[in-house]
Structure formats: C-alpha cells, structure tokens
Amino acid sequence: MTSTLPRRSVGQRVKRHDGDAHLTGQAVYTGDVTVPGTTHAALVRSPHAHATIESIDTTAALAHPGVLAVVTGAEIAAVTDEIPHGLDAGHLGGHHAVVRPLAVGKVVHVGEPVAAVVALTPADAAAAALLVEVGYDLLPVVLDPDAALAEDAPLLYPEWGDNVIIAREVGPDDFDEVATSAAHVLDGELRGHRGNAAPMETRTYLADWDSRRRHLTVWATTQNPHVMRTVLASTLRLPEGSIRVIALKIGGSFGLKMYGNREDFIAPVLSRLVGRPVKWVEERSAALLPAARDQRLAYRVAFDDDGRLRALDVHAVSDHGAGAATHGWGMAHVGALATGLGYALDHCHVRYTVVATNKAPWVGTKPFGKESATLLLERIMDRIAVTTGLDPAEVRRRNFLAPDAFPHTHTSGLELDSGDYAAALDLTLELLDHPAARAMQSAARAEGRCVGIGLGFELMPESADIPGALVAAFDTSTVRMSPSGQVTVLTGVTSPGTGNDTAIAQLVADELGVAMSEITVVQGDTDLCPYGFGNISSRSIITGGNAAVLAARDLVATLHTTARAMLSAGPEEAIVLGDGMAQVAGDPERALPVPAVAGAVHTLSYLLGLDIEPRLESTRTYRPANVRQVPDELGRMNTYTTYPYAVHASLLEVDPETGSVTLLRHVVTHDCGTVVNPMFVDGQVTGGVAMGIGAALGEELVFDADGVPASTGFKTYLLPRAIDLPRVELGHLCTPAPGTPLGAKGVGEAGFSGALAAVVNAVNDAIAPLGAALEATPVSPPRVLAALLEAGQ
Amino acid sequence: MIPHRFDYVAPDSLAGCIEALNTAAPAGGDGEDARVLAGGTWVLPEMSRAESRPARLVDLRRAGLGGVTGTGSGLSVGAMCTYAELLASPDVLRHAPLLHTMAEGITGGWALRSQATVGGSAVSARPQSDVPGALVACGAVARAVGPEGERRFPVAELFAAAMHSSLLPGEVLTGFDVPSTAGAGSGYVKLKRGGSSWPIATAAALVRLGDEGVCRQVSLVLGAVTATPLRVDVDAALVGTTPGDDGVREAAHLAGAAVDEPWDDLLAPGSYRAAVAAPIARRALTMALVAARTTIQETRA
Ligand SMILES: Cc1cc2nc3c(=O)[nH]c(=O)nc-3n(C[C@H](O)[C@H](O)[C@H](O)COP(=O)(O)OP(=O)(O)OC[C@H]3O[C@@H](n4cnc5c(N)ncnc54)[C@H](O)[C@@H]3O)c2cc1C
C-alpha cells in the first residue's frame, strides 16, 4: 500500500507553492491593500544637495482640494524620537548621525524628504506637494571623498568636526615587514562606482492608526517585520505591543527593504498624526537614491615568483553619502573582513574610511560590500598572472586554501567552515572547455578581434550576527499540526520573493512525511509569527529552515509515540512517516494516515494512555554553533555562520571600434552545501550573475555638478535585459556546512561578486593586446573605448 | 498618476482637434497650454512626473491620422501610425525597408510598439531616437495642419533643435510622404549601451547602384550623434565608383569628420558619439551596399 521509505522532497525541483498566484497576478503585494478610509501621502523632497531650511509655507498646499494635512520635519520631530540605528558608527569610534523621518533644519542630499502631504487621492497629494514652498539657504556641496576630506571642506554635520563617518582597520598591519622578503610588490588603485539594488517593487506602506485601541497596523515592504516593529515603537514612543507589522509578498529587495531606513517611518508617523490610514508608495526616482559599492581601493600586494600571495595592504575609501540609521556603512566593514578570504594569505591589512558626502546614503545592498573585496582579489590574481607569466587559473589554484585547511581563521577573524575551491575552479574550466575557449580566443585575435576570458572567485560570508544589533545568526520557527493533519509553519524569517517559504515547506514535509499541499507557511506577521530577524544575509533556510526542522522533529516524536500506541507496535519496532502515512517499519499492513494519528493526539490521549504532553506544536530556535563573538587574543570575532563560494568564467568579445561588450558565455560552479531546492538555488545564482553583470557593464548612479541625480529611472539607470545576457551555465558542488542539521549554506547573495569580477577581468583580457587596461567600473562602452583610444595614442 | 487636473477631448475630426488646440480650456484645470496626445508614451509619463502640466489634452486617436498606405510613388505615413503598423505593412517593406528595419529595433516590446506613434516620436525631436534620422534618410516630406491651413516641408526642417520641433503653436503634424526607395539598398545600424538603452548613435544609409554596380546615388544620415539628424554628403567618396572597402571607409571618415558638435548625455559623452560615428556609418553603408547588390541580382534573375 505504501513504500516503507519516506519520499524526500529536499533536493528536488519542487515548484513554488504560490507560483500560480504570482503568474496569474493574484499574489497580494503591499500596494494591493487598502482599508476603508485610506488616504495617500506624497513627499516634498529637497532639490538641493546641501542647504539649510529657512522656511516652509504650507498655505497653498493646504488649500488644494482633498488635502487633509501638510506635515513638516520639525512637526514630526516634536512628537517622535530619532530613528534607532541598525549599526551605530557612533558606538564603534565613528560619528553618530541623528536621522529623523523627515529632514529637520537642513538637507544633506537631493531628494531628502522635507515635508509630507496627506490627501484623499494620490494625485491630490502629489499636486499639493508641488505647492509647498520651502525656502532654502544654499550651502557648498561635497560630492566625492577627496572634496569631503579636504582641509577646509564644508561639513555635512558641523558638530562632527569632519566628514568621516567611521575609519577602522582590520587585520595585522605588517605589510612592510613581509614585503621586504617577497619577490614582487605591485601597487594599484581600483575604483568602484555607485549602484543600487533596483528591485521591481519600490518601498510601499499602508499604516492604520486606530485611535480607540491606540494601536497601529502597518503593512510594509520590509525584510524584517519584527525588527521594524521594535524600532517603530521606539521612534513613535509606543509600546511594541501596540504595533502590528505585516509584510506581504515582496517584489524584490536585495537589502533595500532592510530595517533602519527613514522611509519605514513616514506612513506610520503620518497615520498617527492624521488619525487616518495613510498609504505611501515610493517614487521610482526616489527608489534609485539609496546606494552602495561606491568605493576606491588603493592597494599594495606582495607575492613570490611562484605566484603565491605574501601580503596585502588595502585602503578603502567609501563615498557613503549622507549619514543614515541603516547598516549601510557596515558594507565597508564587511568588505574589509572578506578581503582575501579563501586564499592562503597570512598578512592582510585593510584600513577603511567611510566618508559623508552630499548624496543619498548607502543602504545595505546585495552582496553587502563583499563584491569590492572579490573584485580586488580577482584583479590582483590577474595582475600576478601577468607579472609571473603564469596562467590566471593556475595563480588562483596555487593560492586557494586546500580542502583540508578547514576550519581556517582568516586574518580578519572570519572562520571558514568548509569548501573545495580548486574543485570549483576545475569544474568551471571543464564546463567552459577552457582549452577550446583559449584556442577560439587566439583565432579571434589573429583576425584582429578582441575576445577575452575572465575568472572570478567569490566567497560570501553569510548568515551574520552583529553583537548588540538586531541582526542575528539564529531564528525561530513554530510547526503546528491540526487534528485533520494540516500543518502550519510560522517562522521569523521572511521571503523577499525568493521562495524560501516553499523550501521551508519542503523541509517540514520531509520530516513529517506529508505532502507539501498539507503545509501552510506563514511569514511576515508580527502578531502571528515568532519574533525573528527576517530576511538578511542569506539566512532564511539556515536559520528559519533549520529551526522548522527541529520543531518538526518534536512533532515527529509525538506522532511516533501516538502511532506506536495506535498500531500496538512493540518497543523494538520503529515507526516511519512517509507518503502521508505512519507505519511500522517493514510492515506496510500496519499503517495509519498521518491525519488519523494527529486526530488521536488531540482526541484520544487518555484512551491511548499517552505518557506525553498531547501537543502537536513546537517552537524551536536554531542557533549555529560556530559564531564567536568573544574576541580572540587579536581582538577578532567570527560573525558569520556559513561560507558559500563560486568560481565564474566569462567569455566575451569587445568591439574595439565602439567599446561594446558582447557576452558570449558565462559559466559558474557554485557550492552552497546541501541544496533544498535546485530550482531556487539556480534562480538565485542566475539572478545574482545578472545583477553582477549589470553592475560591471552599465548600472551606474550619475550626478551633475550640483549633486542632482541624473539616473532617475530605468532609461538612465541601465539594468541588463534578457537579450544582454548569455544563458548562465551552472555547475554545482556540495560541501555540506559541518555541524548543522541541514548542511545548507546561504545562497541569497551568490553570483553577483564573481560575475562582476569575471566580466571586468575578461574585458581587460580582451583589450590587453591593444595595450589598454581598465581599473575602474563600470566597464561601459564609453569607458572601454576611452581606454582603447588612450592606449592607441 | 497625473497630479494635476486637466481637460481631455478626443474630437472625431482633424478640424475638431485643431479647434480644440486653439481655444482656451474651460476653467477648473490648473495647467498651462493645450497639448496634443498621440500614443501618450511620452506625454503621459511627463505629466505623471509633473514635468508637463497642460490645461487640456487633445487626443488625436479619432482624427483619422493612423496607418500607412502605399501611393503610386511611395508611402503615406499617418502621424498616428504606430511602429507595429509599420512592421505589419508590406508597402513599407517594398517602398521603405529602412523604416521596417528601424521599427524592428524599437524597444519596449509590443505594448510600446503598438502604442507609440511615428508622429509622436518625430514631434518629440529627441536626439536619442530612431525615427528622426530614419525619416530624414528616406527623404520624407512632413505635412502639418494648423489654423492657417496645411504646410508641407522636408522632414529635416521639423527637427529644429534637441527636443524642439518646428511645428507652430496650434499645429498638428498629420503625416509624412515618403518617396519610394525601391531598388535601392538600405542599411540601418543602431548602437546602444544595452537592451534598455536609448540609441547612442544610428546610421541610416541608402545606396542605389547602376547596372554595372556603379553607385548612382547615396544617402547617409546619422542620428543620435548630434542634436538633430545629421545628413552627411558622401557623394565624393562613392558616387560614380564601384564601391569597395576603401570607398566605404572614406565615406565613413567623412561622416566622422562631419560631427563637430556631438550630443552629450549621461549615457554617452559627446566624445564617444563622435568616435563611434565613423564605424557606425561604415557598417550602415556596407549593409546598404550588400542590399543594393542583392537587389540588382534579384532583378536580373
Ligand atoms: C518603453 C519605451 C521604449 C522606447 N523605445 C524607443 C526606441 O527604442 N527608440 C526610440 O527612438 N524611441 C523609443 N521610445 C520613444 C517612443 O518612440 C516615443 O515615446 C513615442 O514614439 C512617442 O509617440 P507617442 O505617440 O506615444 O507620443 P506622445 O507621448 O503622445 O506625444 C509625444 C509628443 O509629441 C506631441 N505630438 C504627438 N503627436 C503629435 C502630432 N501628430 N502633432 C503634434 N504634436 C504631436 C505630443 O504633444 C508630445 O509633445 C520608447 C519609449 C518607451 C516608453
């Protein structure tokens, strides 16, 4: 009647449980929600990059039809507290920025919200916002770190005394000693550029203040509903229990919707002030303000004739933009932690300086600063190859940590758990057919064509825990089975559109031996789900998934005991759950449907004489064991849980007359340990590659000389389209995360960094015969052509 | 979502449209002038961003300006003709294959191609667009009707400056007469920064060869490289010769040298546009030559 072995869905290409709803437009996003009496907000934004606010005249706006209120930053400041920081630079030796929902007194970047209008329709709100008259006194602007660090630079925050948000060092400062004995020392500078997460859905909120209950319900596009509630309560001066945050389906996020952004506070504050439900949908141009990746890396590297790295010294200067309450600046820190990771490098020192400028601030953006570290090391590998005459692949192979080197503590303190980097390189080269690709390149060069091959090794520390901050490496899930055998999973992790809810359902289905269709996963509602940290740092399967597995195993124990009693199984006989049945192992005739057993737990516990708590519900927290925050003798910590990695190869052609880049092939071998659902992993890696290629070739936030952003939409911020991308060819390795129930590693930031590096390296490989090189991104056609023309002169 | 209030009319005749454009909108709106609405793919986003606040929109959709038809000597392209209509028309393939190739490369998918109009693109006169250069290369004649009656003029005169057409206030562009280029070879090359980019440089070429493969006539127009389409006289390099690589290269060189005030925007600086003009021109001319030779072979066969 049934097989004796439970059927596993883990590892299978299971379709997402809500795929139909997405494909047919039935999935409910925040923008779809309205409640009776919903009103709409529009923001008045600063047209100036740096100015004091001298006056705000709301008369004309208030007279506009349908307008209920016009609220200024000062009025909000009077009734709220400042926004709590996700990661306060002020606590770590830097400066604390005071951030409020709307600007107070002065503006420090174009687009900074200054006042808000609430009206009956979105159109009336937008029209009235145009009528608010703000008087500004202009201040001189600083738009790049050089200007901001100059002796007499204008200050964004005069009380700081300078424009440095924070400056720190990671790793031992011993380059000079080591370098003296190295065969080669190279120095260089690598310039990144300003990019953005660019999710399809902009940030959207509906906040409903119920004055009778003194209760606030907020539907929000947030990755971290519980934490958002915690910080909302603080700023709004409300008890946490008076707030409910609900995150529905999210149309992409990539860090933009992590807590700490002032945007999270606008609709809630307005609703509280106006006493009506207030909806606010961020404009696309505003969603393109937050930034990342704008970094300049000056470096020195020492290596030997055999290509082996000896020491690396880096100074990273980040063009952060204005101060913020987000974790944004932390990208500079994580970039420093990740520099050199995965390579055998005993001497690695990174100094970073995060500089405030008159642009919108950095916001945590996939892959959170690690991409700069990847690009730097991968450029260095290629430069070593040129210097030593070794093949670039061979240089990497010689420098990779060996598979038996784990656990390995990097100079930054991060403790690598497992991996086989050389195997990933080998598989990538095999999938590419490296000799054939090189032969094709030689043939093309002989015809005067510029074909390039580039490699990129990425190693992403994932599932972070920041001491003292609401970013945790652990999370909590509840699994509950009803009398009819229906399973509800409530979890503290959320899905930004990745489908981890389906993957969690797979895990629970396997443990309980029931079909996926019996399982409902509830995420994102602070009234329903256990307190959790949401979706950040590729943590959802590792934390929420492992926690759900632990909780489901508690239910399994109860189901086993109950089934044993019902089936009169002896102590030596095992019960197995599978295919919706509980059966005595090896005896298919003695079996019961799981719902019958679940019903019995709820209704027959006395009759069956069960000697257990008759409960089919468990809440468990999975906390990985390898995070270490008691500093070692060098003051270092391991703040990450897993270390997935990938090796990319890009094959492309540059048109030497136009600088255009045509991607011919992109191959990636990826290892995220145990794969719960290959479709989702493939999707994450492929999407990450697309983002990385976009960052390499075109996506760039550009400003005019006054600091006014010119990239205000997708015709000026060029995302790659399907026709720009080759099919991403995937290879997989599996090195399970040691010491974890599942063995899974994070995959949410995979693909980006290695693709960025591989493409930049491949472009350089393509144009090298013409004497040209590019050590700055993006490698867009105008820049490639400029480099070629310069080389030709 | 358009923030301001405005009057909307869709008269069922051209005369009605012109009248609506030239009479004041009723009070109650808070915009400025009357504005023509064609496909709306440019007007409506501008209005949503409050960059344009017309008091009245005059929708041309019922004024009978759509479609493209073959005439004895070429094409009559209505101002409201969409890219999709260009693509579907066998007359376009026969008389102005250049317009077909141009329409094939328009981004935005079928939604955009079925909505956006040739007239709307032309009147917008944006440097970074396909239509202006293609129409100039085809030698199209524009037709416009205003309160004073109809005017006809070479389409090149429509493109007064970047973002500025030469239409008079209250005038409606009604369409274009495009002389047949049947028998000539056409080439159209567009350089972009990627799928989502506006055109950075376009080159439209038409080459007519005589029986012995001698070049009788050549027309080369660069688009997106300068504020308005740039017609380059390359007769000296090609006409009267049996064009080979050298001639084409010389013509392309003339094209590159003709760009003295390149258009500059955030997608590509002027120096880039100037640098790519010659190679893009060469590719378009080569394409047109190949097409012209094929045409001759086909007529002989
Ligand atoms: C997603 C997208 C992709 C695009 N891709 C491309 C591309 O690849 N290449 C390219 O070149 N362009 C492209 N465009 C631009 C597109 O071609 C223009 O938006 C379109 O042609 C404008 O036509 P419309 O009918 O929508 O004009 P509308 O928006 O209705 O009008 C545009 C302007 O012209 C005026 N106007 C329109 N018709 C007349 C008339 N008959 N008489 C007087 N005034 C008139 C209007 O008042 C307005 O000022 C794209 C646009 C979008 C939105």
Image (cartoon, rainbow, N blue to C red):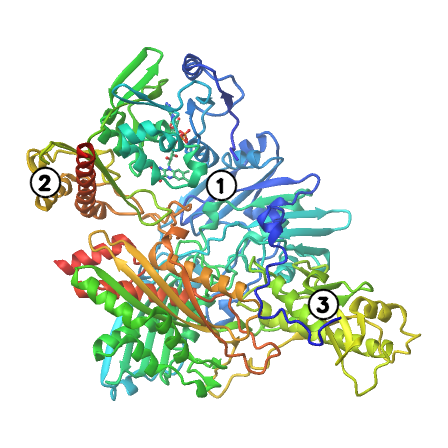
| Residue B225 rendering spot, x and y as whole percentages | 23, 40
Circles 3 and 1 in contact, beta carbons < 8 Å: no
In this picture, residue A701 sits left or right of residue B153: right
Ligand 1 within 8 Å of the CB at mark 1:
no
**N-terminal of the two: label 3 or label 1?**
1
Residue extending farthest to the front is B301
At label 3, the amino acid type is Val
Circles 1 and 2 in contact, beta carbons < 8 Å: no
At label 1, the amino acid type is Ser
- Mark-to-mark CA distance, 1 and 2: 69 Å
Residue indicated by mark 2: B243
Q: Chain of mark 2?
A: B
Residue closest to the eye, A81 or B168: B168
Q: Residue at x 46, y 84 (%)?
A: A409
Crowding near pointer 1: few (<14 within 10 Å), some, many (20+)?
Answer: few
| Residue B261 rendering spot, x and y as whole percentages | 19, 39
Q: Nearer the viewer, mark 3 or mark 1?
A: 3
In this picture, residue A138 sits left or right of residue A483: left
Crowding near pointer 3: few (<14 within 10 Å), some, many (20+)?
Answer: many
Q: Residue at x 30, y 79 (%)?
A: A395
At label 2, the amino acid type is Pro
